[in-house]
Image: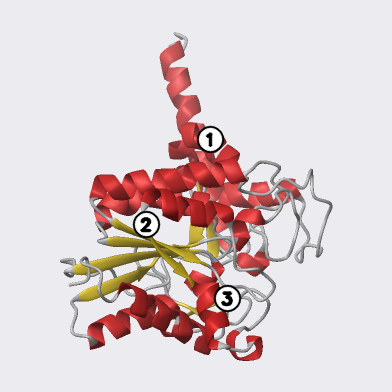
Amino acid sequence: MSAIPRSRRRLYAVLTLTLLAASAEGICRQVWSVEDSALNPKLAHLTDHPTQLWTLHRGRTNDTTAEGMSLTTNRLGLRDDPITDPAPRTRILSMGGATTWGHGVAAEETYSQRLEARLLADGHDAEVINSGITAWSIWQSYVFLAEQGRALAPDAVMLYHLHSDSLPRGVRAPDSFLIEEAQTDRELYRRRHPYRHVLRLLYKSRAYLMLRRAVHGLPRSPPDTAPVTDGQPRVPRADRQVALAGIAALCQSMGTALVVMMPVYQDHSGHDDTLTGFAQSTGAKYIDLAREKSDRGISDADFFLDPLHPTAAGHAHIADWIHTNIAEEPWIH
């Protein structure tokens, strides 16, 4: 009896391993849900992304987050309505973290959607796309714009970033998606980017995600805090400058206007040299939201849900201030 050729044995081995992997994946999908496979159960509405680090799950309808927020996402995984096709005469891409995405408020109460409503009421053919993702940094928005900007073709990009950039890396916390990651956002991007296609497949595998969860050995409810590795922020000043310069270059190449906002927080001075210097050096439209609030004497109790995030009324104020500052811009049609 002749021996089985080596090439055929290899083929049989590959087919056997493929069958076993497919079976394991099928069993995992039957046993565990997407929420079960999340590294942090409190943030199960988020999913890994090979280059943007994390995003919202795409195409969700009336989901409820662990904090009780209603969540509907479009095909890009954004907390917004479906992208208009064909594009309106004025399309604004609103970029930011938790405030932009609308922590603690309904989607229609976010400043992005309120701004869109104001522009439509003025008679403009306008769309404001809310691309904010909870806890996103300026680096993540930069990567998003590099990957999605040309397809969306915005007439203007609005930036609302500050707090998440300064968060320390390497922290284990209930509201952290990057649990104990010891790299900055830029380092994580550079580490993942060469393997992005492989990671894209792995992040869709329930078996891989459950194995990763087991390896991490996380309890169902992560402890409140753990020691920070070295106190270095997620996005150091030099990396913020690189991200901002990259965003400016992308906007210039697309013929897109740039609007830089000074975010407003309860316990912040309302000043950041990096943002103000960037706006001055590039000629970007600059809106000082912290000063707008101060000049109008609006109390913190009426404006904030907590030290960082605005109430629905706070979002309405932000939308009004942005509207006042951009109403006469030539890219508003």
Residue type pointed to by label 3: Thr
Mark 3 sits on what residue? 65
Q: Residue furthest top?
A: 2
- Look at the numbered disc 3 and give the secondary structure of its residue: loop
Mark 2 sits on what residue? 284
Q: How is the image coloured?
A: secondary structure
- Look at the numbered disc 1 and give the secondary structure of its residue: helix
Nearest-to-viewer mark from 3 and 1: 1
In the picture, the quarter occupied by the C terminus is bottom left
Residue type pointed to by label 2: Ala
Mark 1 sits on what residue? 190
* Residue 164 rendering spot, x and y as whole percentages: 61, 59
Q: Determine whether 230 is above or below 330 in the image.
A: above
Taking the image as shown, residue 83 lies to the left or right of residue 87, namely right
Taking the image as shown, residue 123 lies to the left or right of residue 112, namely left
Q: Nearer the viewer, residue 171 or 72?
A: 171
Query: Which mark is first along the chain, 1 or 3?
Result: 3
Residue 48 visible here: no
The residue positioned 37% from the left and 57% from the top of the image is: 284
The 10 Å Cα crowd at callout 3, few under 14, some 14 to 19, many 20 or more, is some
